[in-house]
Every structure is written in C-alpha cells, then in structure tokens.
Amino acid sequence: MMVSNKKKLIIQFAIIILGLIYFVSGFSKAIDVSSFYDTIKDYGFKKGSLLAPLIVVFEVGLAIAFILKIKIRKTALLSSITLVVFTLLFTYAYIFNSVEDCGCFGSLGKDIAPKWLYVRNFIMLMLSIWIYISNPIEAEIKGYKLNLFFSMLLIATYLVGFTYKNPIKTTKRKSFDKIEIDFIGKNINETPLKPYAPASKDSTYMMYFFSYTCPHCLNSMENIKQYTKSGFLEKVILIGTGSEISKNKFYNNFEIPFKNYHLEKKGMKKITDKFPTSFFIINDTIKKHYFGTLPVYQLLLDKKFLD
C-alpha cells in the first residue's frame, strides 16, 4: 500500500511538471505569436505558419488539462503525439534548414543545443506515456475545473489575438526577395548594411550573411579566403547568425582572417532569410548579390561578375 501511495505521488508530481512546462511554453508564445509565426516559417512550412495561433491555444489547453487533471489519460496521449510530431518537425528543420532554435518558449526562450532539446522531449515523452499507462480510468470532470479550463483558454486566445498580425492582411509587406533586390544600385549608407561597412569608401569588398550551422555557408569559406588572396576583392566582412553555442563552434573550427559580426535572428530577417547571401560593394555602391554557395573566384572573373 505504501508503494502504491508513493507511486501515485510521483505520478501526480509528473503531471504537474508537464503541465507547468506546457503552461510556460504556451503563454510565452501567446505574448508574441508573430515571433512563433516566423519560427514556423524558418522551419520551412510557410503555409503551416498560419496555424501558429491554433498551436499556441492547443498547447495552453494541454497545460491546463494537466494542471487541473482533466481527462488525464487522453491529455497524456495528446501530449505524447504532440511531442513526437514536434520533434520530427524540428529534426526536419534542423537537417534541411539549419534551424537550431525550436521556438518552444517563444521570445522568452534561450538558445539551447539541439541535443538538449532532444533530451528534454524524450523525458517529457516518457513521462506522458507513463501517465497514460498509469491512469486506466478517467475521473469525472468537476464543474469548476471546466470553468477554469475555458476561462484560461479565453485569456490565452485574447493574448494570441492581441499579439498576432494577420499575414494574409499584411499584403503591403515586402518579400525578402524584394528587399534584397531593392539594395542593388543603392549607396550602402541607405540600407541596413550600413553598420557593417568599412570606413574606406573607395574599396571593393563583399558582405557575407550566413548561419553558423548552414552547410552551404560553411562550404563557401575556403573559396572566400581566395577572394582576397587573389586580389579579386580587397576585403570580406562576415555577418553570422545563430546560437552562442554554434557561434563558438564555428570560430573554433574555422580560422577566419576577416572582420566579423554577430547578428541576432530578428536583425538578420531585415536583410535576408536565405543563407548564405552575399553582397558585392564597389565604392560604397551595392553592385551585385549572390545566393547560395560561393564559387571559386575564377568563375566570377570569367563571367565578369563585377563588371
């Protein structure tokens, strides 16, 4: 009997822990749904990003159901399915789109290494399955619990609506392609690239915007070094984005002889969402841009790329 009571106590503790995690995760996204919308786009699911408000409300619903112990068996099952689906989606984004920030805790979340995200999700999944197995009988839902449940959902829905900018109605917003094209032919001081420009105005150089974990970005590094060694360019300026962990790993693995800057994701989005993106500047005028892995300098010379 003592063992049974101890087990029940541990199960109740696990239920509360899961509920609190979902609660913090859901409400941290609810107060800034637009950022979560952008995160889903970064995953590579632009159409799916329209579901951002529904996902947040669903997550808050899971949290409240856990905390109030409403239909705990079904809630644990939904939690298990949710964790599996979200982990698979993050894995896709990590492998194919170099996404390291899962966006699990919205704008309040701090960067963590993907391996710790997998560890956390695995522990939560095991707890959810254990709770599901340990609760074969659903308890009757008390009226006050339902009232609390729907009251909290209404609050979450209000926050979501208050912080969400409908992308369908925001038709005047320029696409990233348009923003990048608009830079061409402009003086660099009239663009968001200005803070990274060198003091000398009469030089030919390249600004390279990249992610610390993007394979195409990393594959360009050796070719970029040849751009200055050969005299094709006078300077190269690197502007990277990503977590502090991936940043340190990048600079530990690569010897970078160029001036470099770190730019947070929100700042990078004002310039480009494609990695790598390169801008070629001559005498403070942006002449060309290049998307993708940079070729050897001889190919650009042969094509008279900067002429």
Image (spheres, grey):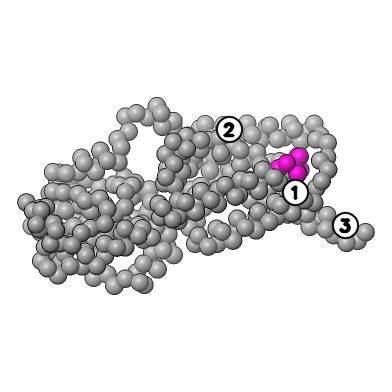
How much space separates mark 2 and mark 3, taking CA atoms?
38 Å
Q: Which mark is residue 5?
A: 3
Circle 3: residue type: Asn
The residue labelled by disc 2 is 157
How much space separates mark 2 and mark 1, taking CA atoms?
28 Å
Q: Is residue 263 magenta?
A: no
Measured as percent of width and height from the top left, residue 49 is found at: 46, 38
Give the number of the mark in front: 1 or 3. 1
Taking the spot 65% from the left edge, 58% from the top edge, the residue there is 123
Q: Judge by depth and name the residue closer to the eye, 273 or 265.
A: 273
Taking the spot 15% from the left edge, 62% from the top edge, the residue there is 297
N-terminal of the pair, mark 1 or mark 3, is: 3
* Residue 291 in view: yes
Q: Which residues are magenta?
A: 69-75
Q: Is residue 73 magenta?
A: yes
Tell me how many marks there are.
3
Is 39 placed above or below 117 here? above
